[in-house]
Amino acid sequence: MATRSKEEILKCLNCPMCLDVLRNATILSCGHSFCRGCLEANDKQHKDLNHIVCPVCRKFTKLDQERVAGLTPNFLAKGLEDILTADVIAQSQEDELSSKLCPLHIRVYRNIYCQPCGEFICIRCYINRHQGHKFKKQEELEKELKTKRDALLEKSTTRNANIEQCLSKAALERDVMNSHLSGLERKVGAAFANKVATLLQHEKELLEKIGNIRNDLANQLESCICRCTNVIGRISNSAQLLTNHASKPSDSDMIKADHLTCADLEDSLKEATDEESTPRVEELRRSVKFAPAGDELLALGCIDVGDNDIETNSSLETGNAMQHIKTSRRKHRRNKRGRKQQVCRNDTGMPETILNSSMSIVRKKAFPLDEGRLFGLAALSNDAVVVGYGNNKRGCDRFTLSGDDIPYLGSEVGDVYDVAFLSGGRTIISRLGYEFFVYNSVSGSSRGMRYACKPSGGCVRVCTDQHDNIYAVNFNPEICIFHGSNPNPQKVVPTGNIRPQHICVTKTGIMITSTGDITPSTVTVFDREGRVGTSIVATHNHEQVYATVDSLDRVLVATVGLYSDVMRLTRYKLLGIELVEEVNFQHLRMPLPIQSNLLWPIGLNSLFYIVSLTPTMVAVATLHHLMFIQLWM
């Protein structure tokens, strides 16, 4: 059997914790030995224990007041360590000595270096096998190597100094180079910024001129469209009345009514509709062209209006517009400079003529017919909304101002006719009928808590306040207020002869309802005791009004019509339960709902929803469109 070397035996005396040779070997009651220092370091981490746990076998060893210092030293291990260490040292010395002796001629030192053979030999080897070879004594070779080593070290020191000097110069030059080139970059950037500023100014002037031309021509067309739409509406209404009366027995009252209707129809047929506006605008439109500047010029170009100079004025009437067509290009240039000086700017950097109480669509999404109609709209955050699809599609989706479109609740919640939000990630989903459910959007539970209003034949519309009260209306002449897990209303506020379809609430608990398409369409203010405040009524049966409340408790009332693609928006402030008009926004033209073989006219009033995201941003959902609208004030 092969015997173990002394080095292997010495390794068996290593500490299991530090894996080094045992120092001040200390034995535990389980028989395992460790360095005393390792045990003391381990014990510092467990001062609250009256024992120490063996890191090898996990057995306990009791400790007295002296802790590790009171444990028994392992004298046997220490003695073996000393003996084996001495033997290893002696063996190492013997091996070192044997390496200096010639293996062929015992007890004879190898102190001669044979240069051709490249090895150390003894004097006997030289006489027997290396006669005629050049050789050197070990002392001479060591002296030569020392001289050569000292010379190389000196050269290395000098070379390192030269390289460090070169490195320092390179680093300094790099800093100077970067500083110089950075200065050139700044100069290039400044020159570019100046030229860009010049081009941007040119762009603003050109876009301003185009905008002014567009506004003037659009005003002429809008006037024509409005007049034609009104005449068509009156003609259609009168013709429908006469058609309906023709199939009924005549009496004196019906004859009088038909006589008046015929007179109204004759007046409508004779009414002028300014049919020359469209050809006139087409002529003006064809004359407006863009003349680009040459590539060598720092300019974009100019808007060429041919022989006509169109002065823009939003107050121009259609019949007088042609009086403002001038033939002098010189006056055109003066007017252009004058307009540049007159345009005032505010903190947003946009012309006041654009920002003063106007609206603009900043994000629009159209929903094809096969994706169904939009039902319900609620603000999820300052830049996101959630919409439902009624019985056209189960679940609801989240849309953001940046254009993101992701599912919010899946098909397990069923049809969604309206949506609202409570704290803690809970979502209210209204279904067709008199019920609505509260789902936990965070936990992902597919079971909702059920609440119910009185049956009415319609769907429930809901909203919430900051105290997690739920306000529900469903065509009944009342507002139901729910709170907590009680499925029945905590309070019912009667609304008299008003049957609300929509509701929104201020932070102070003031409720604003809308009857939607129930004529006459009405927005009405109520307090929690049922007292009635301001009521805004649509001007005719084809017009509807809807309301929303912003984060400053201001009320926004949108007006839309059956025959129109224009939305009018007015902002009110609340004084108690009375509305005080603050701002009338400029009318906004919006996309009409998508039609599919419809034989009757359709307008924005077909399924209209509006919610406030911020004091300057609202979201609007119509039959097939979702829009984010910026309010400029």
Image (cartoon, grey):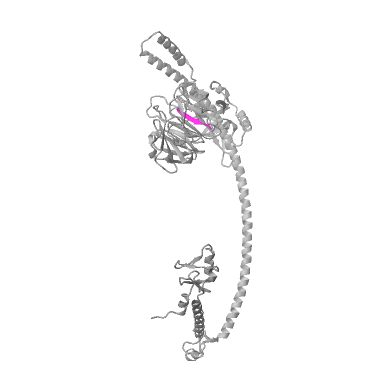
Give the camera-side residue of 479 and 595: 479
As drawn, the residue found furthest toward the front would be 64
Relative to 208, is 400 on the left or the right?
left
Disc count in the image? 0
The verdict on residue 502 being magenta is: yes
Give the camera-side residue of 349 and 422: 422
Can you see residue 275?
Answer: no
Q: In the rendered view, would you say 328 is above or below 1?
A: above
As drawn, the residue found furthest toward the top would be 252
Q: In the rendered view, would you say 587 is above or below 161?
A: above
Give the camera-side residue of 606 and 528: 528
**Residue at figure coordinates x 63%, y 59% from the top left:** 173
Can you see residue 270?
Answer: yes
The quarter holding residue 598 reads top left
Secondary structure of the magenta portion, mostly?
A: strand
Q: Where does the N terminus fall, quadrant-wise?
A: bottom left
Residue 258: x and y, percent?
A: 41, 11
Residue 466: x and y, percent?
A: 52, 36
The quarter holding residue 137 reads bottom right
Magenta stretch: give its range: 501-506
Give the camera-side residue of 584 and 610: 610
Relative to 3, is 361 on the left or the right?
right
Q: Where does the C terminus fall, quadrant-wise?
A: top right
The verdict on residue 236 being magenta is: no
Q: In the rendered view, would you say 163 is above or below 612?
A: below
Residue 103: x and y, percent?
A: 47, 87
Residue 292: x and y, percent?
A: 55, 37
**Residue at figure coordinates x 60%, y 47% from the top left:** 189
